[in-house]
Image: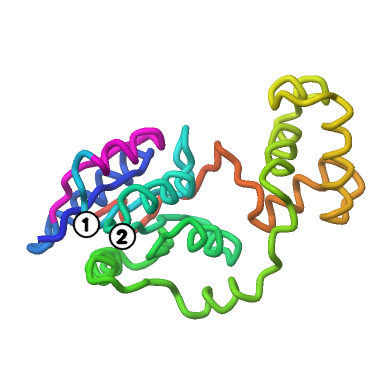
Amino acid sequence: MISVLIAEDMHLVRGAMVALLSTESDIKVVAEVGHGDEVVPSCLLHQPDVALIDIGLPGTDGLTATAEVHRRLPECGTVILTGLATPAALRRALDAGARGFVVKDAPAGQLAGCVRRVAAGERVVDPELAVAALNAKRNPLTARELEVLEAAAEGAPVGEIADRLCLSGGTVRNYLARILNKVDARTRVEAVRIAREAGWLWSHDLSEPILSRYRSLN
């Protein structure tokens, strides 16, 4: 029996996935959570074979949670669920240690198949998307630069960014100047747009389309 944890903040989608997988004789959903901060504790408690993790969870985002599960419970195969099938999103998922990458508008039957293959130690990724991810432009920004840009994306002024990140105003301005130069942008707004389109900057309130195939299981 393959044990599965589902981390998805949209109740209808999570309920549909639980119902779908519960029809499979060799798969058992042992836990379901709706917040990113619950993923790691729940995985450590239930020790699932596979964890299906939404990329846009509130709190700790799905990619961060995936990386932590991979670090603390490497025997658990993680699968990223997303409505955003981009090479950058896939690259970030693979960098986080995910073994699977499932787009939410994929045929419903593929979910159980993905769970079985990941539980068997396989990596499940669309071949064309994998090639595109390998060819995608790599993120030129450091982790600290991404923190500064994320704060700027929320509209925070330099002083607030400095206070939030325990930096001086001059250091924040230097970071912003380097960011603009690295991404070839003229303004902060343009830099944020470029970074988000490339998948380097992930919005914590990222909303994704509900999988229409999961709305009805009949």
The magenta stretch spans which residues?
28-44
Q: Position of residue 88 (x, y in %)?
A: 60, 62
Does the magenta portion include 58? no
Determine whether label 2 and label 1 are within 8 Å by CB.
yes
* The image quarter in which residue 79 lies: bottom left
Which residue carries the number 2 mark? 77
x 71%, y 49%: residue: 142
In this rendering, is residue 119 above or below 175? below
In this rendering, is residue 66 above or below 61? below
In this rendering, is residue 141 above or below 150? below
Q: Relative to the observer, which residue lies in front, 213 or 179?
A: 179
Q: Relative to the observer, which residue lies in front, 13 or 134?
A: 134
Per the model, the C-alpha gap separating discs 2 and 1 is: 6 Å
Q: Position of residue 210 (x, y in %)?
A: 42, 49
- Per the rendering, the mark at residue 49 is 1
x 16%, y 54%: residue: 3
Q: Where is residue 111 in the image (x, y as percent from the top left)?
A: 29, 64
Question: On the rendered structure, is 124 left or right of 150?
Answer: left
Q: Which of the two labelled residues, at mark 2 and mark 1, occupies the earlier sequence position?
A: 1
Question: On the rendered structure, is 159 left or right of 210?
Answer: right
What SS does tag 1 mark? loop
Q: What residue type is labelled 1?
A: Asp
* The image quarter in which residue 165 lies: top right
- Per the rendering, the mark at residue 151 is none
* The image quarter in which residue 34 lies: top left
Question: On the rendered structure, is 179 left or right of 217?
Answer: right
Q: How crowded is mark 2: few (under 14 residues within 10 Å), some or many (20 or more)?
A: many
What SS does tag 2 mark? strand
Does the magenta portion include 40? yes
Q: Which amino acid does label 2 sit on?
A: Gly
